[in-house]
Image: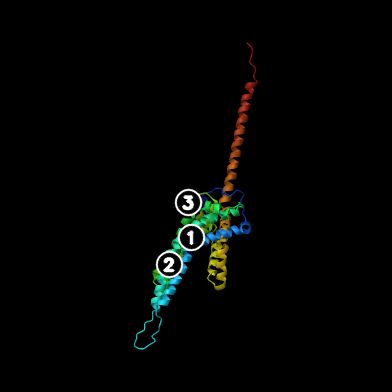
Amino acid sequence: MSAVNNLAAKLTVKRDLSPEGRVTNYKGRIRQAMMAIQMNLTKLVLLNLLMVVACAPLIAMYFVTRSQEQAVVAGLNFSTGIGVGFGVVDDTLIAIEKIYDIRLMGYGLAIFPTCLLVGLFASGLYYCCRNMLWGTKVKVVSHFFRGVKRNWYKYMLSFAWLGALATGFACSLIMVLKENALSGAANAGWWVLMIACAVIAFLSALYMAVGQGMYVCYKYTMKEYIRNTACLTMIMIVPTVFVTLFFAGVMALSFVNILGIFILIMMVMIGFSAYAMFNVAFSQYVTDNMIAYLYEEQEKIKAKEIEKLNKQKNKEKKKQQQTKAPQYGKKKKKK
């Protein structure tokens, strides 16, 4: 408890930007998110299509690399020594090296700018989801661009960091696979880089599970956002880890044959929007239990202090009136 109290003492406490009171029950926030999705389904689908557009550089690079890989395979000789006296060469290793080089170049160039673009679009998406969650009427285009205008730098900073980690992880993974395929063992440095990027990315995902929703629900400086998010993530570490692993598990299932196809279809239709909605709801749940609670307690203390000061002022006024009363009551003596 002492550790929690120490972390709570470092929080910058303010009221959130919501027009109404808060919901302290986790189930209440989940129910709130589900109702918001049902009531704004068409708008969320449109917002989701915008997020798919933001992923266009990575999607385009996927198809470009696939076509280049096919061209490499078609242009090389994969004979296995058939023929006499012609010295036929098997180009399998050459093909493997070229294919991995294509992937390294393609994904190394595409991941970071895609993350930046996703971060830019996410600032508008989260703003719209916040308003839907709070019951505010949302106009997709105007509210989306208003959210981008107000919050773009917060989300782009977070996604730039995530993009750098994703690029490092993808490139090191490709190099590990390439060296394993060519020589049977990868350089230890690539393994270290890959594992380090994965661990830091997971910790960053914990931060973003709380921070992304807070960006649109509270008005802080960037330093206050980082400090509050870090403290809240450590205080609420168990539910934050659970939520992060849940969504990571859903993404992992997208690589499983038929189930993966279904998940990808859902991602294209409403996946990004649904994630953002539940992310804002979870962030509100976390802040409800700490920042909003501390804010209410501070307001109660302030109200008591104001009431105490008012009572003291009233007492002083009564004393002044009592001391002045006899003077008004005295009659002047006639000479």
Q: Is residue 188 something that shows in the picture?
A: yes
In the picture of the structure, the residue carrying the numbered disc 3 is: 222
Circle nearer the viewer, 1 or 2: 2
Q: Can you say whether 297 is above or below 330 in the image?
A: below
Alpha carbons under labels 3 and 1: distance apart: 16 Å
Q: Is mark 1 in CB contact (under 8 Å) with mark 2? A: no
In the picture of the structure, the residue carrying the numbered disc 1 is: 204
Alpha carbons under labels 3 and 2: distance apart: 33 Å
Residue 42: % across, % down:
60, 59
Residue 113: % across, % down:
45, 60
Q: Amino acid at mark 2?
A: Gly
Q: Which mark is residue 66?
A: none
Residue 125: % across, % down:
54, 56
Alpha carbons under labels 1 and 2: distance apart: 25 Å
Which is nearer the eye, 26 or 17?
17
Q: Circle 1 sits in a helix, a strand or a loop, which is it?
A: helix
Q: Amino acid at mark 1?
A: Ser
Disc 1 residue crowd, few under 14, some 14–19, many 20+, Cα 10 Å: some
Disc 3 residue crowd, few under 14, some 14–19, many 20+, Cα 10 Å: few
Q: Which quarter of the picture shows residue 213? A: bottom right
In the picture of the structure, the residue carrying the numbered disc 2 is: 106
Answer with mark 3 or mark 2, whichever residue precedes in sequence.
2
Figure colour scheme: rainbow
Q: Is mark 3 in CB contact (under 8 Å) with mark 1? A: no
Answer with mark 3 or mark 1, whichever residue precedes in sequence.
1
Residue 297: % across, % down:
58, 47
- Quadrant where the C terminus lies? top right
Which is nearer the eye, 142 or 302?
142
